[in-house]
Image (cartoon, coloured by chain):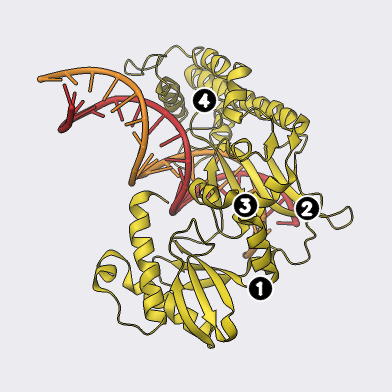
Chain colours: A yellow, B orange, C red
Amino acid sequence: MGKHERGWVEATEKLTAQLANDAEPDGDLEAEGRPDLAEALADRIRADFPDRTAVRHAGNSYDSLGDLIVESDGGSETFLEAKFVASGGTRANLGQDTLTQFELFEDATAWSDFREEIGFPEDRQALLQEFDDYPDDVRDWSYKSAVYDRAKHLKNVLDVSRGQNTGSRADEVLADPDATETEREAARIVNAILELDREEKLAYFDHLREAEQNPRNVETFAHLIVCGYHTADALREHFDTDLDEIKRLLENDSYRLYEVDKNSGTVSVENPSELLAGFEWADTRVEIPEDGTSVSVVTGPPGNRRRVLNIAYNWKNKFQGIQTPSMNVFVPEA
DNA sequence: ATAATAGAGATAGGTGTTCC
DNA sequence: GGAACACCTATCTCTATTAT
């Protein structure tokens, strides 16, 4: 979540606490936040915690897990992570080098560095240069965007429609007897880059497979993702110190994920400990397939191995191998 | 059909560069 | 030396494709 979003989110969280406490809402917070969402969330918290004695804002997220803390009779506390979402799905989109940055692998090369080392950019450029009919305004090779401009043009030649898989479209063109030679050339180059990218990913996975893993970091990463920390910033805030605390909260059943739909105000609740029910946290590691472009975090002894996360290596924008390398993280449904 | 996953588009905000 | 601009990355969001 960008910085300019954090303001209204935090204001809405604080407002939620005030409303749930039946306190007079602060006017500044009402102006800065989304009172409608705060109202919806506060209503749900009141209903879910009839025995509450107070709800407080967790304050500085460096100090505490969760955004809101519900206090109940006897001093017990439930930590709520509140997320304001525009559409469903507990999915994280992370930077391309996240797994090495957070040292799930030790002494492994980052994906971005690995591509440089094996000469991926040069191979890709050579393929793009096989097409010699680019418009005059494509930028020269001193710019990274030189690649984007040319890839974009190839997609234009192929007439790829919005959202359409570029590789499928290239195959259509090659199968079309009426396609021009220019179109065929564009399709061949696109397919060659897609293949190059796949090879590059498989080679990187070979590299990762050789690397030592840090089981505690793998476990921390998995827990943070499942508990709703989905941005690099959020992961960083909690990575070093909070695994034991998270596990304790999950064991005590005192952690919840509240999702508020920004459009409808609908609130849904997830209990991460249910999602992880029956998991034995032993031999936690990243499993890397021989073919395929995503890895999994698995845990548990043989006979009770469970998949905690799926992590796909992919590129957004244009097509695979061109722009915005990234990692999509999925929490498989329990 | 529906769920899961892969692929794609948009954009905020940071950083570097240019120009006055 | 700072405004204006160009560029880039990370991430939010959405859609198409594939698996069940």
Task: Name the residue tied to disc 1.
Answer: A253
Measured from the top left, where is residue C2 in percent x and y? 17, 31
Q: Earlier in the sequence, mark 3 or mark 4?
A: 4
Whether residue A68 can be seen here = yes
Labels 3, 2: front one: 2
Q: Chain of mark 4?
A: A
**SS at circle 4:** loop
Neighbours of disc 4 within 10 Å: few (<14), some (14-19), many (20+): few
Name the disc covering residue A178, or none.
4
Q: Earlier in the sequence, mark 3 or mark 1?
A: 1
- Kind of residue at badge 1: Asp
The one of A89 and A230 positioned closer to us in this rendering: A230
**SS at circle 3:** strand
Name the disc covering residue A299, or none.
2
Residue under disc 3 on the same chain as residue under disc 4: yes
Name the disc covering residue A330, or none.
3
Whether residue A317 can be seen here = no
- Kind of residue at badge 4: Asp
- Kind of residue at badge 2: Thr
Labels 3, 4: front one: 3
Q: Earlier in the sequence, mark 4 or mark 1?
A: 4
Q: Chain of mark 1?
A: A
Labels 4, 2: front one: 2
Report which quarter residue A73 is drawn in: bottom right
